Image: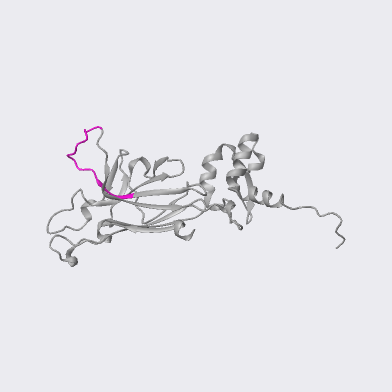
Amino acid sequence: QQQKMRSRSENNDISVHAIAGTRDVILGLNLQQKDDESGDSSSSTTLSDMLSGLTVADDANGADRAASESSLPEKNGQSPSHDLFVGFSIDRRDLSSGKSTSLNFEGRPIQKFHYGDYTVEPGHQYEYSVRRMIKAPSRSRYSFFSRPKYVAVGSPLVITVTTEDPSTSKHGVYFNRGAAGSQAYAEKFGEFRKWHRVNKYGTPQWTSTINPLTIPDPAKKKEACAWLSRGLEEALLEFISQAKVVLGNSE
Protein backbone atom coordinates (compact mmCIF):
# COMPACT_ATOMS: atom_id res chain seq x y z
CA GLN A 1 0.00 0.00 0.00
CA GLN A 2 2.83 2.39 0.86
CA GLN A 3 4.54 1.85 -2.49
CA LYS A 4 1.31 2.52 -4.37
CA MET A 5 0.65 5.79 -2.54
CA ARG A 6 4.20 7.09 -3.01
CA SER A 7 6.17 7.05 -6.22
CA ARG A 8 9.22 8.81 -7.63
CA SER A 9 10.66 8.88 -11.13
CA GLU A 10 12.99 10.95 -13.28
CA ASN A 11 14.34 11.28 -16.81
CA ASN A 12 16.92 13.53 -18.46
CA ASP A 13 14.65 16.60 -18.21
CA ILE A 14 12.65 16.46 -14.99
CA SER A 15 12.01 14.52 -11.80
CA VAL A 16 8.65 13.94 -10.09
CA HIS A 17 7.82 12.75 -6.58
CA ALA A 18 4.13 11.89 -6.10
CA ILE A 19 2.36 11.30 -2.77
CA ALA A 20 -1.31 10.28 -2.78
CA GLY A 21 -3.81 10.79 0.01
CA THR A 22 -7.53 10.03 0.07
CA ARG A 23 -8.76 12.85 -2.16
CA ASP A 24 -5.55 14.58 -3.18
CA VAL A 25 -2.24 13.89 -4.89
CA ILE A 26 0.79 16.10 -4.19
CA LEU A 27 3.45 16.35 -6.90
CA GLY A 28 6.99 17.54 -6.19
CA LEU A 29 8.47 18.75 -9.49
CA ASN A 30 12.04 19.62 -10.38
CA LEU A 31 14.27 20.24 -13.39
CA GLN A 32 17.44 18.31 -14.03
CA GLN A 33 20.44 20.65 -14.01
CA LYS A 34 22.33 20.57 -17.31
CA ASP A 35 25.66 21.93 -18.41
CA ASP A 36 25.97 24.12 -21.48
CA GLU A 37 27.49 22.87 -24.75
CA SER A 38 31.00 23.72 -23.59
CA GLY A 39 30.64 21.30 -20.69
CA ASP A 40 31.35 24.01 -18.13
CA SER A 41 28.66 23.73 -15.47
CA SER A 42 29.75 27.00 -13.89
CA SER A 43 28.56 28.97 -16.92
CA SER A 44 25.24 27.15 -17.38
CA THR A 45 22.02 28.96 -16.57
CA THR A 46 20.74 27.97 -13.15
CA LEU A 47 17.14 27.13 -12.36
CA SER A 48 16.70 30.33 -10.33
CA ASP A 49 18.08 32.34 -13.27
CA MET A 50 15.57 30.78 -15.66
CA LEU A 51 12.61 31.56 -13.44
CA SER A 52 13.76 34.97 -12.21
CA GLY A 53 11.08 37.45 -13.22
CA LEU A 54 9.47 35.01 -15.66
CA THR A 55 5.75 34.77 -14.99
CA VAL A 56 2.80 33.97 -17.20
CA ALA A 57 0.51 36.97 -16.90
CA ASP A 58 -2.16 38.91 -18.73
CA ASP A 59 -1.34 42.13 -20.50
CA ALA A 60 -3.71 45.05 -20.88
CA ASN A 61 -5.45 43.32 -23.80
CA GLY A 62 -5.95 40.07 -21.86
CA ALA A 63 -3.37 38.13 -23.90
CA ASP A 64 -0.90 35.75 -22.27
CA ARG A 65 2.69 36.81 -22.18
CA ALA A 66 5.92 35.66 -20.56
CA ALA A 67 6.78 38.72 -18.53
CA SER A 68 10.26 40.11 -17.93
CA GLU A 69 11.96 37.72 -20.34
CA SER A 70 14.38 40.49 -21.27
CA SER A 71 15.55 40.61 -17.65
CA LEU A 72 16.94 37.08 -17.83
CA PRO A 73 20.72 36.71 -18.11
CA GLU A 74 22.36 36.35 -21.49
CA LYS A 75 24.14 33.10 -22.27
CA ASN A 76 27.33 33.16 -24.33
CA GLY A 77 26.55 36.75 -25.28
CA GLN A 78 23.14 35.86 -26.72
CA SER A 79 19.67 36.81 -25.51
CA PRO A 80 17.41 34.08 -24.07
CA SER A 81 15.66 32.08 -26.77
CA HIS A 82 12.06 30.93 -26.95
CA ASP A 83 13.27 27.51 -25.71
CA LEU A 84 13.30 29.01 -22.24
CA PHE A 85 11.50 26.90 -19.63
CA VAL A 86 8.23 28.52 -18.55
CA GLY A 87 6.58 25.75 -16.52
CA PHE A 88 5.17 22.24 -16.60
CA SER A 89 2.52 20.40 -18.59
CA ILE A 90 0.63 17.84 -16.49
CA ASP A 91 -1.93 15.36 -17.82
CA ARG A 92 -3.80 12.94 -15.58
CA ARG A 93 -5.43 9.66 -16.57
CA ASP A 94 -7.78 7.72 -14.35
CA LEU A 95 -6.79 4.10 -14.96
CA SER A 96 -10.09 2.92 -13.47
CA SER A 97 -12.26 4.73 -16.02
CA GLY A 98 -9.70 5.58 -18.71
CA LYS A 99 -10.66 9.29 -18.55
CA SER A 100 -7.83 11.73 -19.33
CA THR A 101 -7.69 15.30 -18.03
CA SER A 102 -5.28 18.17 -18.62
CA LEU A 103 -4.43 20.01 -15.41
CA ASN A 104 -3.18 23.06 -17.33
CA PHE A 105 -5.87 25.74 -17.20
CA GLU A 106 -6.50 27.03 -20.73
CA GLY A 107 -3.20 25.52 -21.86
CA ARG A 108 -1.10 27.70 -19.56
CA PRO A 109 2.03 26.24 -17.95
CA ILE A 110 1.93 25.23 -14.31
CA GLN A 111 4.55 27.44 -12.63
CA LYS A 112 4.88 25.57 -9.37
CA PHE A 113 7.36 23.04 -8.07
CA HIS A 114 4.86 21.84 -5.44
CA TYR A 115 1.53 21.11 -7.12
CA GLY A 116 -1.60 19.72 -5.48
CA ASP A 117 -4.31 17.88 -7.41
CA TYR A 118 -7.46 18.01 -5.27
CA THR A 119 -9.90 16.58 -7.81
CA VAL A 120 -9.17 12.87 -7.37
CA GLU A 121 -11.42 10.20 -5.89
CA PRO A 122 -10.64 7.62 -3.16
CA GLY A 123 -9.47 4.18 -4.25
CA HIS A 124 -8.54 5.17 -7.81
CA GLN A 125 -5.27 4.60 -9.63
CA TYR A 126 -4.00 7.66 -11.48
CA GLU A 127 -1.29 8.08 -14.08
CA TYR A 128 0.39 11.49 -14.37
CA SER A 129 2.34 12.52 -17.47
CA VAL A 130 4.65 15.51 -16.91
CA ARG A 131 6.62 17.48 -19.52
CA ARG A 132 8.46 20.78 -19.75
CA MET A 133 6.73 23.72 -21.42
CA ILE A 134 8.28 26.50 -23.49
CA LYS A 135 6.96 29.45 -25.47
CA ALA A 136 5.72 28.34 -28.87
CA PRO A 137 8.17 29.26 -31.66
CA SER A 138 6.98 32.05 -33.93
CA ARG A 139 7.54 29.75 -36.91
CA SER A 140 5.85 26.44 -36.41
CA ARG A 141 3.58 23.96 -38.12
CA TYR A 142 0.55 25.71 -36.66
CA SER A 143 -1.32 28.45 -38.51
CA PHE A 144 -1.40 31.96 -37.08
CA PHE A 145 -4.87 31.53 -35.62
CA SER A 146 -4.37 28.03 -34.19
CA ARG A 147 -0.79 28.40 -32.95
CA PRO A 148 -0.66 27.79 -29.18
CA LYS A 149 1.20 30.23 -26.95
CA TYR A 150 3.01 27.46 -25.09
CA VAL A 151 4.00 23.93 -26.10
CA ALA A 152 5.13 20.86 -24.18
CA VAL A 153 8.53 19.49 -25.19
CA GLY A 154 10.72 16.55 -24.28
CA SER A 155 9.85 13.02 -23.35
CA PRO A 156 6.89 12.73 -20.96
CA LEU A 157 7.69 11.46 -17.49
CA VAL A 158 4.94 9.04 -16.43
CA ILE A 159 4.27 8.26 -12.78
CA THR A 160 1.46 6.20 -11.20
CA VAL A 161 -0.06 6.37 -7.73
CA THR A 162 -3.18 5.01 -6.04
CA THR A 163 -5.34 7.08 -3.71
CA GLU A 164 -6.34 5.53 -0.40
CA ASP A 165 -9.84 4.16 0.12
CA PRO A 166 -10.63 4.52 3.85
CA SER A 167 -13.67 2.24 3.59
CA THR A 168 -11.63 -0.85 2.69
CA SER A 169 -9.38 -1.07 5.75
CA LYS A 170 -10.02 -1.72 9.43
CA HIS A 171 -9.35 1.92 10.30
CA GLY A 172 -10.41 4.76 8.01
CA VAL A 173 -9.29 8.38 8.18
CA TYR A 174 -11.74 10.98 6.86
CA PHE A 175 -11.28 14.73 6.46
CA ASN A 176 -14.25 17.02 6.04
CA ARG A 177 -13.86 20.30 4.18
CA GLY A 178 -13.09 23.26 6.43
CA ALA A 179 -11.64 26.73 5.91
CA ALA A 180 -9.28 25.47 3.19
CA GLY A 181 -12.25 24.78 0.93
CA SER A 182 -14.21 27.93 1.73
CA GLN A 183 -13.55 29.61 -1.63
CA ALA A 184 -14.66 26.57 -3.62
CA TYR A 185 -17.72 26.23 -1.36
CA ALA A 186 -18.66 29.88 -1.98
CA GLU A 187 -18.29 29.40 -5.74
CA LYS A 188 -20.54 26.32 -5.75
CA PHE A 189 -23.24 27.59 -3.37
CA GLY A 190 -22.79 31.37 -3.41
CA GLU A 191 -26.36 31.92 -4.60
CA PHE A 192 -27.54 31.01 -1.08
CA ARG A 193 -25.33 33.57 0.69
CA LYS A 194 -27.04 35.62 3.40
CA TRP A 195 -25.76 38.91 4.78
CA HIS A 196 -26.21 40.09 8.36
CA ARG A 197 -24.75 42.70 10.67
CA VAL A 198 -22.56 41.78 13.62
CA ASN A 199 -21.01 43.81 16.39
CA LYS A 200 -17.29 43.06 16.45
CA TYR A 201 -15.26 44.76 19.18
CA GLY A 202 -17.91 47.45 19.46
CA THR A 203 -17.93 48.21 15.71
CA PRO A 204 -20.93 47.13 13.62
CA GLN A 205 -20.06 45.50 10.29
CA TRP A 206 -21.60 43.32 7.62
CA THR A 207 -20.65 39.68 7.18
CA SER A 208 -22.04 36.80 5.17
CA THR A 209 -22.60 33.09 5.67
CA ILE A 210 -23.79 30.19 3.53
CA ASN A 211 -25.45 27.86 6.02
CA PRO A 212 -26.20 24.56 4.27
CA LEU A 213 -29.03 23.82 6.73
CA THR A 214 -30.95 26.94 5.64
CA ILE A 215 -30.74 26.29 1.87
CA PRO A 216 -34.39 26.13 0.72
CA ASP A 217 -33.80 23.73 -2.17
CA PRO A 218 -33.73 20.18 -0.68
CA ALA A 219 -31.49 18.81 -3.44
CA LYS A 220 -28.99 21.68 -3.10
CA LYS A 221 -29.11 21.39 0.70
CA LYS A 222 -28.23 17.70 0.50
CA GLU A 223 -25.48 18.42 -2.04
CA ALA A 224 -23.94 21.17 0.13
CA CYS A 225 -23.94 19.00 3.26
CA ALA A 226 -22.37 16.10 1.37
CA TRP A 227 -19.75 18.42 -0.16
CA LEU A 228 -18.72 19.75 3.27
CA SER A 229 -18.79 16.29 4.88
CA ARG A 230 -16.69 14.65 2.14
CA GLY A 231 -17.56 11.18 3.44
CA LEU A 232 -17.11 11.88 7.16
CA GLU A 233 -20.81 12.00 8.12
CA GLU A 234 -21.60 8.97 6.00
CA ALA A 235 -18.77 6.98 7.61
CA LEU A 236 -19.90 7.97 11.13
CA LEU A 237 -23.49 6.94 10.47
CA GLU A 238 -22.37 3.65 8.95
CA PHE A 239 -20.14 2.94 11.95
CA ILE A 240 -22.92 3.75 14.45
CA SER A 241 -25.35 1.52 12.54
CA GLN A 242 -23.12 -1.45 13.27
CA ALA A 243 -23.97 -1.24 16.99
CA LYS A 244 -26.05 -4.17 18.21
CA VAL A 245 -28.45 -4.35 21.13
CA VAL A 246 -27.64 -7.25 23.42
CA LEU A 247 -30.71 -8.55 25.27
CA GLY A 248 -30.73 -10.64 28.43
CA ASN A 249 -27.30 -9.47 29.57
CA SER A 250 -27.52 -8.53 33.28
CA GLU A 251 -23.99 -7.18 33.50
Query: What residue is drawn where x is 18% and y is 67%?
Result: 42
**Over which residues does the magenta segment extend?**
130-145
User: Please, which colouring scheme is shown?
Assistant: one colour
Query: Residue 75: horizontal and vertical position, in percent?
Result: 15, 58
Query: Residue 166: horizontal and vertical position, in percent?
Result: 57, 53
Can you say whether 60 is above or below 145 in the image? below
Query: What residue is drawn where x is 51% and y is 41%?
Result: 187
Query: Residue 162: horizontal and vertical position, in percent?
Result: 46, 52
In this orientation, which residue lies closer to the viewer: 216 or 154? 154
Magenta-drawn stretch, dominant element (helix, strand or loop)? loop
Query: Residue 43: horizontal and vertical position, in percent?
Result: 17, 64
Can residue 81 be found in the magenta stretch?
Answer: no
Can residue 138 be found in the magenta stretch?
Answer: yes
Residue 198 located left or right of residue 244: left
Residue 20 located left or right of residue 9: right
Residue 163 located left or right of residue 195: left
Q: Which image quarter is the C terminus in?
A: bottom right
Residue 147 located left or right of residue 22: left
Q: Report the number of discs.
A: 0
Query: What residue is drawn where x is 36% and y is 54%?
Result: 112
In this orientation, which residue lies closer to the viewer: 90 or 63? 90
Residue reaching furthest to the front: 248
